Image: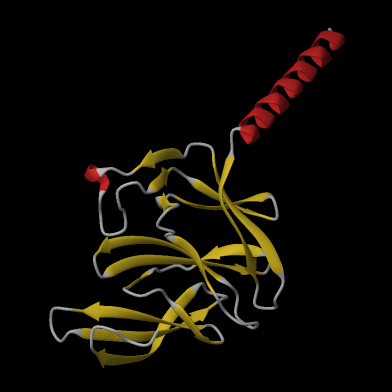
Amino acid sequence: MKKILLASALILTISTSISTIHAEAQTKTYYKTKLASASGKKYDMTLRSSNAKKIIADDLLISPNVNVGDVLYNGTFNFYINGKKTALKTNEQYNKTGKNFYKIATKKGTPTFFATTETIANNVTDVTLYYMYKGKPVKLKNGFFTTLKPKYVKKNVIKIANYDNNNWLGYDIHYLKINLKTADYKIIKSKRIHGFEIDW
């Protein structure tokens, strides 16, 4: 009887292992880059998915951030750091052609910020930021809207620009100070610049 139980347990273990290996084999990498922590330590970050579906955009899928022929992926993307799966994930559509996933270049003392974005209008992009903190990827609790890509200013401070074509034809510039520990931010400065183009 003991031999039968042991054999059953062994078969179950082998079956589970095979299932796990099969699941990992079906997981594909869709995006990879390197992220640095505030101290300068670098990490390999990949976004992997086992259910992402590839779509080639046609006339019916055109939007402010999607053009005909763009390669899109819809699915759940899991964050892997140095090859290990983390609890962090995103369901944001990945436009490989339009490059709506990107890094914000920073300097030592500030971590590299990784952005996933969705353009919801011609001048409005919804941005979510991620960064490395104490060896783990962290998602900023609140996203923000911007017209131009966020830009590094100084330690833990970035700036964003929103174009206002309804009231005065210009940009509202906001400076965001990010609290790495609480994964939140506050606006520490704002200004307006008139005109269609600004030095960014």
User: Which quarter of the rendering shows the N terminus?
Assistant: top right
* Location of residue 98 by image quarter: bottom left
- Residue 7 location, quadrant: top right
- In this rendering, would 145 be left or right of 135? left
Residue most extreme to the left: 167
Q: Position of residue 53 (x, y in %)?
A: 43, 37
In this rendered view, identify the residue nearer to me: 140 or 124.
124
Residue 77, compared with residue 5, is above or below; it is: below
> Which residue is found at the position 64% from the left and 33% from the top?
25
**113 vs 187, nearest the viewer:** 113
Residue pushed farthest right?
A: 3
Residue 108, image x and y in percent? Answer: 65, 82
Residue at figure coordinates x 37%, y 49% from the top left: 70
Q: Nearer the viewer, residue 174 or 13?
A: 174
The quarter in which the C terminus is drawn is bottom left
Q: Residue at x 27, y 91 (%)?
A: 192
In the picture as drawn, the residue positioned furthest to the front comes out as 69
- Quarter holding residue 55: top left
Give the answer, above or below, for where 141 lies relative to 1.
below
In the image, is 180 to the left or to the right of 184?
A: right
Model colouring:
secondary structure
Q: Position of residue 109 (x, y in %)?
A: 64, 83
* Side of 47 relative to 101 (left or right): right
Q: How many discs mark residues in the rendered view?
A: 0
Instruction: Say above or below: 129 vs 51.
Output: below
Percent x, y of residue 93 = 40, 50
